[in-house]
Image (cartoon, rainbow, N blue to C red):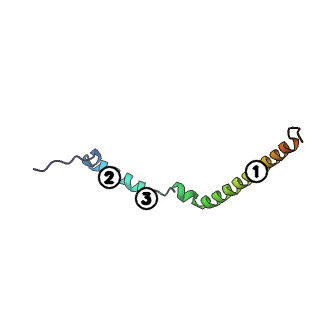
Amino acid sequence: MGAAIPTHPAFTCCESNRRRTLLFVAARFNDSSESFMERYSDLLYPGAAALSIIGSVLVGLYTRVAQVALQKAGETGNGDS
C-alpha cells in the first residue's frame, strides 16, 4: 500500500555487511587522530605575530632603501645646480 523506500545495499544485505558498516562508522567517529586545527592551533597566534614582525621589518627596510635611493638621485641631479 505504501511506496517502498530504497535503502543502501549495505543495510539490505546480510547481517555481516550491516555489522561491518556499523563498525566502520563507529571506528570513524571514535578515531583518535587530530584535525589540523587541533594539531596546530597552538602555533596560530605566535605564527601570525612572527609573520607580522617579519613583514614590518621588510617594509621598513624597503622604505629605507627607497629613501636612500631617492636621496642619491636628488644629489646627482641633472647638472643644473
What residue do we see at 9% from left, 50% from top? 1
Name the one closer to the observer, 5 or 48. Answer: 48
Secondary structure of the residue carrying numbered label 1: helix
Q: Where is residue 33 in the image (x, y as percent from the top left)?
A: 50, 55
State the separation of the CA atoms marked 2 and 1. Answer: 67 Å
Which numbered disc, 2 or 3, marks the residue closer to the eye? 3
On residue 33, the disc is none
State the separation of the CA atoms marked 3 and 1. Answer: 54 Å
Q: Where is residue 78 in the image (x, y as percent from the top left)?
A: 86, 38
Q: Mark 1 points at which residue?
A: 63
The furthest residue to the left: 1
Q: What residue type is labelled 3?
A: Asn
Which numbered disc, 3 or 1, marks the residue closer to the eye? 1
Q: Name the residue under label 3.
A: 30
State the separation of the CA atoms marked 2 and 3. Answer: 16 Å
Proximity of marks 3 and 1: CB atoms separated by less than 8 Å: no
- Count of residue discs: 3
What residue do we see at 65% from left, 60% from top? 46
Question: Mark 2 or mark 3, which has the lower sequence index?
Answer: 2
Which numbered disc, 2 or 1, marks the residue closer to the eye? 1
Secondary structure of the residue carrying numbered label 3: loop
On residue 19, the disc is 2
Q: What residue type is labelled 2?
A: Arg
